[in-house]
Amino acid sequence: MSAVAAEDSLTLNLLGPIEAHRGGEPVDLGGAKPRTVLAALLLARSRVVPDTELTALLWGESPPVTCSAQIHTYASRVRRLLGPAVTVERRRPGYLLRLPDQGVGIDLLTFRQYAARGAAALTGGTPGTAARVLRQALGVWRGTALGGVCDPLADLERDRLEEERLTTLEQRLSADLELGRHAEVIPELMALIAAHPLREGLRGQLMTALYRSGRQADALAAYRAARATLAEELGLEPCAELQRLHQALLTGHPSLLPRTTATTATGRSGPPPPAELPPAPADFTGREQQVARLTEALTGELPGPAVHTVTGMPGVGKTALALVAAHRVADHYPDGQIHLDLRGSGPDPLHPADALGTLLRLLGVPEGRTPGTLDERVRAYRTRIAGRRLLLVLDDAAGERQVRPLLPATGGSAALVTSRAGLHALEGPGRTPLGPMSAADARALFEKLAGRSRVSAEPGAAAGVVRACAGLPLALRVAGGRAAARPHWPLARLADRLAEPDRTLAELTLADLSLTDRLWTAYRGLDPRSRRALRFHSALGPHPLLPHAAAGALGTDPDRAEELLAGLAEAHWCEVVRWRGGYGYRLHPLVRLFARARLAEEEGTVPLPLPVPHAPAPAVRAGAVRHTG
């Protein structure tokens, strides 16, 4: 099934109160019975749920005579509320829920994905990664699972889900113990044992944490307490593992100490590995699906190097996303993490030979021993990183020719590349085209920057500011910074200024942050015909533009006009939107304002031979062929 358009994206939550959100807005699911039907279909995971099973989950042993009709009503309600992208299919003897490939997030699946990666990292000897990823898994939970469903479903499934959560929690505590956080976890373990006195894994972790904190007597007392509880409640002795741990406590066995790790995965001596990543934005908001996809791509088992691109228009947050993902996987690359600004959007992109010279120096090659030619540097670089686990963040790439020599050639290392170009000629990377933020995430980011009290006091004005920024993180950051810098200004004043098209871009400047400057830099990188196409596109209205309309305005044939428009889309100046069996090209609202200003300066008035036909704005962005930038 195809992907869901961004504004129609669904989030379905089971790990807490049963909830659904479309485009960030809550969906009213009604009472317990439709929530139960939704939860049962989601838990079935593409399995037909028979009417008899639904009847038992809804009414237990006392179903009404009309139960079949009521189940049909509840299934129809779920189908209507979730929208056309989600199929609730009548498949006798019951119902089947089908989900699209993308655009629907289910918190239970997210939790399980993080939990599996965290468990693998713990087994693989990278406790830092394990602790971080397992915390992400546990952070998905919002309370007691399956809140608001009928009792029979809760009784059947809730304990199983809680067991998954506790298992993941114990793994996270094991990772923390490996990282030497024994004193920090003792209070948490005591509270957990009070709530779950029969979980021997938690008892063993408390004993270990106490011993490592220099409290051997308390550790032995914790074992005696565990033995007494198990005998009283179950009439059993502690398990063999807990008994072995007790013997180790009595003798001070070295197995009680945390495992030590080498400085690097290969045991090399020498200077410490590079740790060059800039800090990730502390106020990073949303984009969880993209971060999860990048994290998985950079930590999965691959036969060769992991290469992933993040592309999009100026100001859309490519670097922020890359840094957040890079920090989350940093422990997976113990031989170093390097950030290199390739300056691809500026007038003087970094030459590949110079980039390789920098990389070789960071990898320990003395300044005077760096090879001279590009080919020699490529060979030396590949030799240097062979067998290492190295993470490269290659930021702001100009194009494929600049990036190719810098990519690792063997497994173990990874490269995360950001660019305003599409980089479609690179061989086989994972791709994350990044578009504007959803309305809900945009508002959340503005609230973080401007202050919750300001936004709550003027919700209408805050909505106007967010709307004017059109989901672009750079614009939101500037607007939020301006609001925070001028607390005596009402937000309505900023909203009014941003609402005036002639001054919108001028208002989106703060200190060294300027949307206009970013757009100017990218604009200069276009060839003259593409610049002209962009300028004329802005004059033809805000709706998707069809190639034959562009051809009339540009004075060229439709094929050439479509080539120009497609090139702009590949460079993330516009997006492609499906319409009536064809495609139209639509500018981001702030790009359109910029291009109109260039039009006025460089073209003057633009006589159009005829009213230009264009595609009317569709009621729903039809799952566009997304060059979203």
Image: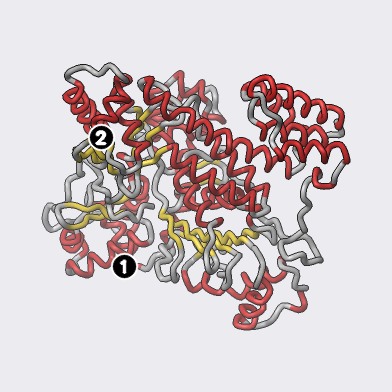
> Disc 2 or 1, which lies upstream in sequence?
2
* For residue 23, above or below residue 4: above
Q: Position of residue 552 (x, y in %)?
A: 16, 62
Q: Position of residue 183 (x, y in %)?
A: 78, 33
At 37% across and 22% down in the image, what residue appears?
152
Q: Amino acid at mark 1?
A: Arg
Which of 181/623 is in front?
181
Q: Residue furthest front?
A: 235
Q: Residue furthest left?
A: 610
Q: Secondary structure at mark 1?
A: helix
| Quadrant of the image occupied by residue 395 | bottom right
Q: Position of residue 97 (x, y in %)?
A: 28, 39
Residue picked out by circle 2: 50
Asked if residue 330 can be seen in this view, the reply is yes
Please rate how many residues cluster around mark 2, counting C-alpha atoms within 10 Å: few if below 14, some from 14 to 19, many from 20: some
Asked if residue 351 can be seen in this view, the reply is no
At 44% across and 45% down in the image, what residue appears?
289
| Quadrant of the image occupied by residue 547 | bottom left
Nearest-to-viewer mark from 2 and 1: 2
**Residue 564 as seen in the image, left or right of residue 292:** left
Please rate how many residues cluster around mark 1, counting C-alpha atoms within 10 Å: few if below 14, some from 14 to 19, many from 20: few
At 73% across and 22% down in the image, what residue appears?
228
Which of 345/432 is in front?
432
Which of 300/274 is in front?
300
Residue picked out by circle 1: 529
| Quadrant of the image occupied by residue 463 | top left
* For residue 160, above or below residue 400: above
Q: Position of residue 103 (x, y in %)?
A: 35, 44
**Residue 469 as seen in the image, left or right of residue 343:** left
Q: Amino acid at mark 2?
A: Pro
